[in-house]
Image (spheres, rainbow, N blue to C red):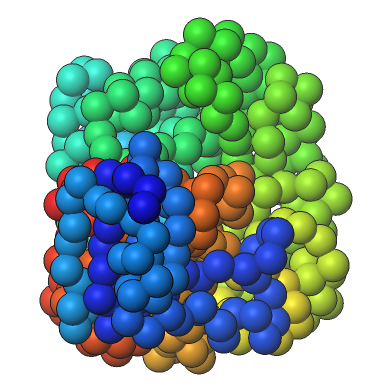
Amino acid sequence: MKKIDLLIHSAEQLVTCAGPDGPKRGAAMRDVGIIPHGALAVSGGEIVAVGETADLRARFSAAETIDASGKVVCPGFVDAHTHVVYAGDRIDEFEMRIRGAEYMDIMAAGGGIAATMKAVRAAGLEQLVAESRARLDAMLRLGTTTVEIKTGYGLDTAGELKMLRAIETLADTHPADIVPTFLGAHAAPPEFKGRTDDYILLVIDEMLPAVAKWYQNSKFKIQNSKLFCDVFCEAGVFDAGQTRRVLEAGARYGLTPKLHADEFETLGGVSLAVELGAASVDHLDVTPAAEIAALAQFATVGVVIPAVNFNLGSTHFADARAIIDAGAALALATDINPGSAPCPSMPLVMAIATRYQRLLPAEALNAATLNAAHAVGLGDRLGSLESGKQADALILRANDYRHPAYQFGQNLVKTVLKRGRIVV
């Protein structure tokens, strides 16, 4: 009998979300890999076996056991698109939108991203880390064990590097795995109003070299973790040509492309994303059918973010149903940020996606775990409960995996394990 560190046993459903190499597509999205009366064997922070309880109990002797009777065990959630590092809030804008103001109008008037930029520039590193850690703690309690975090609220070289240092500090001190993304091209700051091309030159000629230098001395480089480069490709922000210039420059420094695209208007961002081999293209609220069909032919993951639409009071959502039916890889994310999505909850995102985007609960769970892991370049390490993968798992106060999408307004996560260690 082999000795192991931990055995979670007697789960009503052990949900693996396991699949073949790469993200799930099409019909595979409806399979979450349920093992009734399942068990999970863990040693050294990795999964050594999954299977029926009787089988694993006969094979392993565990230093610690957890009885999951009547409960679901599933992978930890992966949040593939966030702006969780910021200072302050934008609650005044929330009230302005209730009164009828549009998001892009607020942004054009100097609010939105620029308002958070001012708060981030004024905040010290310790304040930025402390405020952001509290949000990460909330996300962890809601089952998120891996988080992509973007910069984009400094909008000058010093501010963007401060955000990267905050992201690195959080990665050193928080249980969640953190994936960094440089988003210097989030918006042109007020000092570059009317000079967007000049700001793009600053991003390319000054920010990117400084970011690449920071990365070479960061814990992410030491751990061989990717650094991504993202651009907000949107009308009134950055056009497709400017987006291409930044992403191609980032690639020369070894940064993997990502894109914000088609949130309000379509500028060809999806075609650009697949051409450049982007890990993901995110939002997709107004993506045409032809571009969805093109996305299905490539490895780029489409990330949809329904909490934004919900928060903005919109009845229009990205056509996630069409994305899956076309055979493209789909992931879900919160986009947690102070303006358009102050939402830490992947279960709430799943609940919205099932109702407004017609995803089945199985599709929503796969999109929030394995596919989201592939969207941040970690699908080979986490996102599913399979032998050899990192032991990131949740124990839910439910006897059926569909409950997190079915029930909303409460937290069904009882226990969170990260690398086989209980962190909640």
Residue at 64% across / 12% down in the picture?
209
Q: Quadrant of residue 167?
A: top left
Picture coordinates of residue 50, whole percent (x, y): 44, 65
Q: Is residue 392 rendered to the left or right of residue 197?
A: left
Note whether 261 is above or below 163 in the view shown: below
Q: Quadrant of residue 298?
A: bottom right
Note whether 146 is above or below 97 in the view shown: above
Residue at 31% across / 24% down in the picture?
172
Q: Is residue 155 at least partly visible in the picture? A: yes
Q: Nearer the viewer, residue 419 or 50?
A: 50
Picture coordinates of residue 290, whole percent (x, y): 83, 77
Q: Nearer the viewer, residue 74 or 298?
A: 74
Q: Quadrant of residue 406?
A: bottom left
Picture coordinates of residue 227, whole percent (x, y): 57, 30
Q: Is residue 73 rendered to the left or right of residue 223?
A: left
Residue at 19% across / 57% down in the picture?
65
